[in-house]
Image: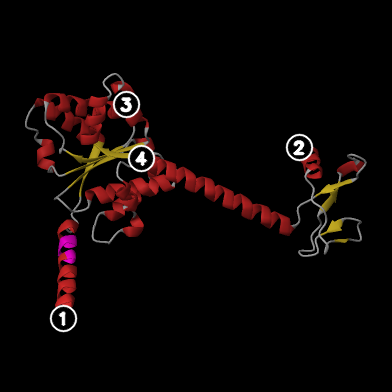
Amino acid sequence: MSDYDNAVFRLATAQEAEPEDYTGEDGLLYCGSCRQPKEAYFAEGKTLFGRDRHPKECDCQRKRREMLETADREHKHREEVERLKRIGFTDPAMREWTFGNDNGKCPQMAKARAYVEQWEQIKDGNHGMILWGEVGTGKSYFAGCIANALMEKEVSVSMTNFALILNDLAASYKDRNEYIARLCSFPLLILDDFGMERGTEYGLEQVYNVIDSRYRSRKPLIVTTNLTLEELQNPEDTPHARIYDRLIEMCSPVCITGENFRKAKAREKMEQLKMLLNRKESL
């Protein structure tokens, strides 16, 4: 839009002068608060609708407009983040798996932060991760922190597991390819608790189809698993070998060595219960 067109727009949307506004020595209207002009003359003697001047933002008006625009952008951003989390998480509890809620007991959490910070390079290089380690060490939480942080950047992420995927595939036989294609459309796909799904011939075939499709999409994949690195590198049979070879080719292994938070939480709850029971006895 040209300066002249902008002037036409400002004339059409001009507001009335405020009581404290005044006319300066140059004949223009000035803001009584910030003392900046609220009008400007057209260049080169141009006129519009018989006027030789057009409205102009003073500092007060500019600040109000910028505040409204910032509030509008923030509102739209929160709506988009809410939409992404509604679509991307299969469990509402995953929304709480954030860096802000981290207890600091996972030594590898800095890698999760770096993954988010370097997302553009991660995405372009198609860098995935296999998060492995003992049960309860925070592998899923680690992945959830990445998912939440990327969603806050308005990056679409899907965090699910093969138990749900296999159920969905069984229920949508005709739309199987479309379903897998939708999974592969997410810039980041996180498969939680890999290796816990049914080991049937059908199940293994569908697991391979999903992982192979993701491989061909050339988009990052993060997998959490209770399998050991040795088990991944030495599969028990050919169907598992096909799956694990694809995973290892796509994803770099990262061992999560945090404290078993489930046991720690169980101990904490037991102590809380003891305190409540002892308090009851003392009454």
Dot placed on the residue nearer the N-terminal end, 3 or 4: 4
Answer yes or no: do the residues labelled 4 and 2 have beta carbons within 8 Å?
Answer: no
Q: Secondary structure at mark 4?
A: helix
User: Disc 3 versus disc 1: distance between alpha carbons?
Assistant: 59 Å
Answer yes or no: do the residues labelled 2 and 1 have beta carbons within 8 Å?
Answer: no
- The residue range painted magenta reads 264-269
Q: Secondary structure at mark 1?
A: helix
Amino acid at circle 2: Ser
- Describe residue 83's horizontal placement relative to residue 29 as left or right: left
Q: Which residue is mark 1?
A: 282
Identified at 81% across, 49% down, the residue is 55
From the image, state whether disc 2 or disc 1 is nearer to you.
1
User: Where's residue 33, x and y in %?
Assistant: 77, 65
Residue 105 occupies which quadrant of the picture? Answer: bottom left
* Residue 2: mark in rendering: 2
Answer yes or no: do the residues labelled 3 and 1 have beta carbons within 8 Å?
Answer: no
Dot placed on the residue nearer the N-terminal end, 3 or 1: 3
Q: Secondary structure at mark 3?
A: helix
- Describe residue 101's horizontal placement relative to residue 16 as left or right: left
Q: Which residue is mark 4?
A: 88
Q: Residues within 10 Å of mark 2 (few under 14, many from 20)?
A: few
Q: Nearer the viewer, residue 249 or 21?
A: 21
Q: Which residue is mark 3?
A: 179
Dot placed on the residue nearer the N-terminal end, 4 or 1: 4
